[in-house]
């Protein structure tokens, strides 16, 4: 599957962006994510729920990886793809490695808080357990704009 196949329905990133918009509507930082099975089936999708749950680890990526593993009845997501609207932070990037996802696809890059292309660049570290294939910048402008507008509204 390519990052944004045009099959007449929403692409995985468009679905993740819908989850991010829904998160923003709930007052959460607008990040959405989903996990695709090896055959492309959506196993789980969610937006951030940090504020609602009062849990700093309730990032969209963590929620969908946990839910996908539970749905599959296993601890690993081998062959699966994690799709997120923002470059995963170090916590989520490390979790993706531990869950053994095959691929991580993301929208906006995160120079301040990212853990894959920025910051600790976890998958480049010699001790990294598993290095998912990574594709960044999918619908980057739309994902970045959503975040930018959310934070501008908070400041005003």
Image: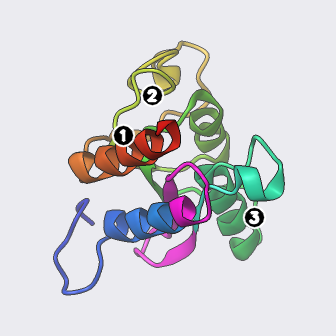
Q: Is residue 109 above or below residue 140?
A: above
In front here: 4 or 69? Answer: 4
Location of mark 2 (residue):
116
- Mark 2 lies on a secondary structure that is loop
For disc 1, the neighbor class at 10 Å (few under 14, some 14 to 19, many from 20) is some
- 92 magenta-colored: no
| Residue 83 locus on image (x, y percent) | 43, 56
- Mark 3 lies on a secondary structure that is loop
Location of mark 3 (residue):
74
| Residue 16 locus on image (x, y percent) | 43, 64
Is residue 67 in sight in this rendering?
Answer: yes
**Going by the picture, which residue comes out furthest to the bottom?**
8
For disc 3, the neighbor class at 10 Å (few under 14, some 14 to 19, many from 20) is few
Magenta stretch, residue numbers: 23-45
Location of mark 1 (residue):
134
- Mark 1 lies on a secondary structure that is strand
**Can you say which quadrant of the picture contains the N terminus?**
bottom left
For disc 2, the neighbor class at 10 Å (few under 14, some 14 to 19, many from 20) is many
Q: Identify which residue is drawn at 61% across, 16% down.
A: 127
Q: CA distance from mark 1 to mark 3?
A: 23 Å
* Cβ atoms at labels 1 and 3 below 8 Å apart: no
Q: Earlier in the sequence, mark 1 or mark 3?
A: 3
Q: Is residue 37 above or below residue 32?
A: below
* Cβ atoms at labels 1 and 2 below 8 Å apart: yes
Q: Identify which residue is drawn at 81% across, 56% down.
A: 53
Is residue 106 in sight in this rendering?
Answer: no
Q: Earlier in the sequence, mark 1 or mark 2?
A: 2
Q: CA distance from mark 1 to mark 2?
A: 8 Å
Q: Is residue 87 above or below residue 62?
A: above
Q: CA distance from mark 3 to mark 2?
A: 25 Å
């Amino acid at each position: 599957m390519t990052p944004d196949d045009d099959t007449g329905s929403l692409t995985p990133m468009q679905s993740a962006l819908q989850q991010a918009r829904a998160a923003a509507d709930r007052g959460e930082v607008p990040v959405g994510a989903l996990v695709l099975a090896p055959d492309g089936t959506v196993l789980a999708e969610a937006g951030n729920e940090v504020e609602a749950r009062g849990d700093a680890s309730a990032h969209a990526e963590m929620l969908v990886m946990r839910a996908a593993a539970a749905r599959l009845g296993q601890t690993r997501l081998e062959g699966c793809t994690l799709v997120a609207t923002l470059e995963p932070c170090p916590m989520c990037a490390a979790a993706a490695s531990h869950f053994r996802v095959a691929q991580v696809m993301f929208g906006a890059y995160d120079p301040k808080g990212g853990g894959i292309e920025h910051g600790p660049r976890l998958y480049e570290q010699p001790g990294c357990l598993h290095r998912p294939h990574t594709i960044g910048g999918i619908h980057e402008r739309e994902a970045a704009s959503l975040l930018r507008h959310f934070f501008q509204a908070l400041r005003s």
